[in-house]
Image: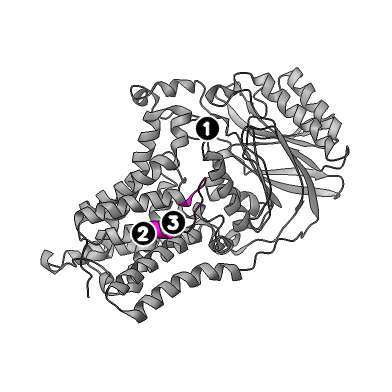
Amino acid sequence: MPAREPSRVLSLVLAALGGALAWAAFPDLGWWGTAYLAVAALFLAMRRDSARWNALLGLVWGLVFFLPHIAWADYAVGPVPWVALSVLEAGFVALFGAAWSWARRGNAVWRSAGLQTVVFVVLWVAVEELRSAWPFGGFPWGRLAFSQADSPVLAYASWGGAPLLSLLTATIGVSLALGLLAARRLAVGSTALRVGAALAVVVGGLLVPLPSGAEAGRLVVGAVQGNVPTPGLDAFAQQREVLHNHAVGTHALLEQVEPGELDLVLWPENGTDVDPQVDADAADEIDAAAQAVGAPMLVGTVEYPESGGRYNTAVLWEPAQGVVATYSKQHPAPFAEYIPLRSLVRPFSSAVDLVRNDMLPGTKVGLVPLESERLGRVVGIGDVICFEVAYDQLPRDAVRAGAELLVVQTNNASFGYTAESTQQLAMSRVRAVEHGRATVQISTVGVSGVIQPNGVVSGRTGLFTAEQLVASLPLRESLTLASRLGAWPAWVVDALALCVVVTGTAGARRLRRGERPDGVG
């Protein structure tokens, strides 16, 4: 029997509350359990048969969530781009609300708790996938999966990656909502079943095996967080000083290790914005640091091709030899590293003029071959740069190409003392579990971290500090189920979402409006 639909005022309150609960689930608060309540609140709010109304509720939920969640965009580029991006992302939640209405109209969804759950969560994940790919390559920030880095549910990422993690998070939320509706009807059995199912998913994560031991030896790595003169967009105005800070930090590693004990030293994205391949002074300073520690260094820098533009590049620097391998960022951030539709956007924000030289996309998978003298072989280093960690394909491609550990080089200086860096660390933890790889997130200013293949953070720095991390990392070659499946889980979800919307819309045409459901539950 359909449940009584809530009043419009209550629906709006539930939607706004859900957005706030979603925000609390992510760092810096990191109250991961509130992600389930956020989905439950949205499900309870969207019980009217009105695509327009549910779209409005989705917009409210999305705005209350995204505006504080990506407040770092306001710090970095100002209020207009921040609000515009928040509205765009909230628009996808609005689309979800409309799709939920369309999908259930001509189907028997409202008569089955199981169907309600499946359709709701499938549509949610499909919309997450859509906004992660479109427009301009998408913006995956704020996916439910990235709220679960401290949750037992994180372990499921090794089975189906971020899509499965989001799907299970949403499933728990819908189950709790259905349990509440059953409790209101005094249906004790149904209440226990639905709440028990939600708890079973959470507790079940503790039973998922996450092998973390070394399969191909260990790599001793030093990571250098050099810091910058000042937070904000002008942090790299003094490029030589930033380079020098990281060189000094490299020498400081010798307080923890002897020369030659490290297999690799990691610098962050923009560790030097002076290209050592064309600047002799930069090359000399980097090589002196590399020779002092007696180890190759993966250095974040910038390349300027003669044809114009620039590349965000990592170079592998061998002592006394120079660059032996490179990786260039494949997914530059739109409106931050390059400006689409520049002439159309400029009237709304002068911040576009801060990017005078558009960044070009790299074309090679992020696999850097490290010739390890101690191990007597080539070790595959999987490299992703900054926001690339949010995109499923890029770290997966690196692992499937042979990466035995992952490195996330990032520059968080432009975001000040916001939660951007800790949100990114949560993403890195998801990737570590998803692919069963030790992962190092190294930032110019923090937060940097050493992550074990099971997602545990074994070392972490502060924000806007000069620190160094040293870790012996397990090298792994086997592929998790998630790595093997690749994009298939997302494709299956997308296909199911399309099917339920199409069949629901087609079925609705056969129903008179008075025969449509008043609510679900």
Identify the residue under disc 1: 415
Q: Is residue 335 visible?
A: no
Q: CA distance from mark 2 to mark 1?
A: 32 Å
* Image quadrant assignment for residue 63: top left
Residue type at numbered disc 1: Phe
Q: Secondary structure at mark 1?
A: helix
User: How does the figure colour the protein chain or chains?
Assistant: one colour
Is 387 in front, or is 73? Answer: 73
Q: Residues within 10 Å of mark 2 (few under 14, many from 20)?
A: many
Residue tagged 2: 123
For this view, does 447 lie left or right of residue 179?
right
What residue does disc 3 label? 35
Q: Which residues are magenta?
A: 25-39
In the rendered image, residue 469, in percent from the top left (x then y), is placed at 74, 41
Tell me, yes or no, whether the highlighted magenta stretch contains residue 417: no
The residue positioned 72% from the left and 19% from the top of the image is: 279
Where is residue 164 drawn, in percent x and y? Answer: 49, 61
Disc 3 on helix, strand or loop? helix
Earlier residue among tags 3 and 1: 3
Q: Residue at x 34, y 52 (%)?
A: 17
